Image (cartoon, rainbow, N blue to C red):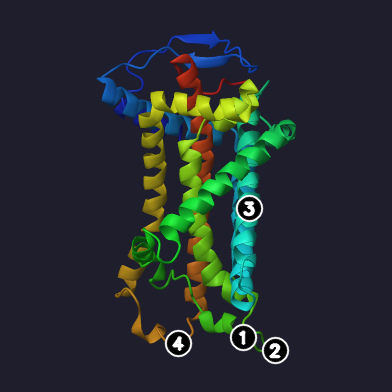
Amino acid sequence: MRLIFGIADQWLGLCRKPPVVHALQSGIGTPPVYAHEGLPDGGAGGSTIRRGIGSALSGMRTLNRNRQLLWFTLLAGLVLAGNIICQGALWYINWSIGGLVGPVLEFFIELATLFCFVFLLAGLVLSISSRKEGHASFFEGLTGAKKYTTAIIAWSFVLALAGMLLYRIFFYPGGFFWPLSSYLTIPLLQFPFTLNLNPSTFAEIPGYGGRSLLFWTYPYGFENALTFSAINLLLLLLTAFVVPLIVLEHRTLREAVVGSFSLMKKTWVEVATCALLLGIIVSGVFLTYLLVQAAHGMVTPPELLYAIPTGPWIALGILYYLALFSIAFVMATVGGIAALDLYRYAKTGQITGPEPHS
């Protein structure tokens, strides 16, 4: 693993000269930060792109050294699973009751989901920044994040309002991007990794009749959860430095938002490059389903269009989903670590080096 990272750093031009290590006292209540003095410039564009890629690689190294941070990955995955179930229940409520109950519940589901994600992100930032000897404890970071619960709730409320607005404008049926979003779901509808692997199984409750919660959860709740997740990810990327400013510099919410946009102006290329690299990795894993379909000989086996898929195909689809979401949330964890690295760069003008060994 270290050899791979070393080769990647050499290829990206990150290690052309031995780094000069300094202890930087940031003055924001965090321990000294070990940083490399300047990266070799190959033009402004090349330098910013290398910093973005380097921050992603540094995040991978940090996660590899500190496996406790995988708790963030697991807990974030559980939050998404809860969101999927709630979205499925919301579909059932809309179908059975309708009215204004659905939009109100939709907002509260979005608010609760964002609160959990922002709280976990605050814990991740604090756990990395407050390391003493050896590896950081993620749960110690979560404990420290409790002091900022009020600010986290307020920020989650703002993000939830923005997310609902974007959803209604662009992704709601009839919205601006509704045809595009429908087109982008086509790859997900290809067997064996389809959003409705076996809809007939979920259509009736055995011995009762009627639509079960599983029917509404999969695929409808699943689709809604993915749409809101994409919106939430975009919002968190555009405001990547709000959480570090709140928990590390103890800024008010207004000051943190203003400060985040100010820092984002300096590092938007690095942030975009880092996000693009991590997105390419996740997309590469997603597109592996094409290999399975090509090996099968056709995109959608006609004998399975109107028949119940066999057990092995269902198991394959479920394992694929587990692998895909595991990689996606690992990359999200790396992105959170990289965001802190870029935040320190925006504050000090220097790239953070590898985590020092105990």
Secondary structure type for disc 4: loop
Answer above or below: position of 27 versus 201.
Answer: above
Q: Which mark is residue 208?
A: 2
Give the crowd class for mark 1: few <14, some 14-19, many >=20 residues within 10 Å: some
Mark sitting on residue 307: 4
Task: Residue type at mark 3: give it.
Answer: Val
Image quarter (top left, top right, bottom left or bottom right) of the C terminus: top right
Nearer to the camera, 2 or 30: 30
Q: Secondary structure at mark 3?
A: helix
Residue at image mark 3:
79
Hey, what amino acid is under mark 4?
A: Ala
Q: Which mark is residue 204?
A: 1
Q: Residue at x 66, y 84 (%)?
A: 205
Name the mark nearer the viewer: 4 or 3. 3
Could you tell which of marks 4 and 1 lies nearer the N-terminus? Answer: 1
Q: Is residue 279 left or right of residue 155?
A: left
**Mark 3 to mark 1: distance in Å?**
27 Å
Nearer-the-camera pick, 286 or 212: 212
Which three-letter amino acid code belongs to the residue tagged 2? Tyr
Question: x and y percent of residue 71 in the render?
Answer: 64, 43
Q: Position of residue 314 (x, y in %)?
A: 50, 74
Q: The disc labelled 1 sits on which kind of residue? A: Glu
Q: Do the CB atoms of the residues marked 1 and 2 lie less than 8 Å apart?
A: yes
